[in-house]
Amino acid sequence: MATLEYDIASLKRDLTNLFRLPIGDRLALNQFYVEAQTVMRRVHDAKLQVPSLVSEWLAQADLRAKDPLLATTQNAALVAWLQSV
């Protein structure tokens, strides 16, 4: 049975998909965090080296939902990183 490799391209795809998820209500936020945990588990299992901004972005969706300035700042940093890799 073949195993699928989790690499930077896979991470970019997953982060892009998460970026599109709404986080405005509790149900949507919970779904975001379920998906975010899966992504972090894949990153850990694949031993990928990612900047701390990725884990911070995944962990702070609730803060972004409440603070538009933080959302703008974190989202811009994540997009910049995604475009750089």
Image (tube, grey):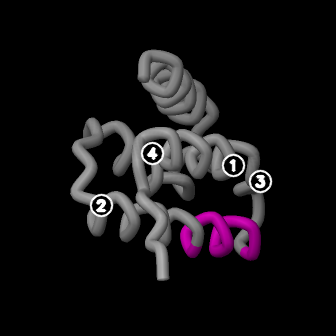
Q: Residue at x 46, y 53 (%)?
A: 58
Q: Earlier in the sequence, mark 3 or mark 4?
A: 3
| Cβ atoms at labels 3 and 2 below 8 Å apart | no
Q: Residue furthest bottom?
A: 1
Q: In the rendering, at what x and y percent does residue 49 appear?
A: 23, 43
Q: Residues within 10 Å of mark 3 (few under 14, many from 20)?
A: some
For mark 2, give the secondary structure.
helix
Disc 3 to disc 2, C-alpha distance: 27 Å
Counting from the top left corner in percent of width and height, residue 1 is at: 48, 83
Residue 80 in the image: above or below residue 64? above
Cα–Cα span, label 4 and label 1:
13 Å
User: Which numbered mark, 3 or 2, is in the foreground of this view?
Assistant: 2
What kind of secondary structure does the magenta stretch mostly adopt? helix
The answer to whether residue 35 of the structure is visible from this angle is yes
Alpha carbons under labels 3 and 4: distance apart: 14 Å
Q: Which residue is mark 2?
A: 46
Instruction: Write down the residue under mark 4.
Output: 57
Mark 3 / mark 1, whichever is N-terminal = 1
**Which residue, given by chain and number where applicable, does mark 3 sit on?**
22
Q: Which residue is mark 1?
A: 17
Whichever of callouts 2 and 1 sits on the residue coming sooner in the sequence is 1
Between the residue at mark 2 and the residue at mark 1, the CA separation in whole angstroms equals: 19 Å
Q: Nearer the viewer, residue 26 or 13?
A: 13
Tag 3: amino acid? Pro
Question: Magenta stretch: residue 29 in it?
Answer: yes
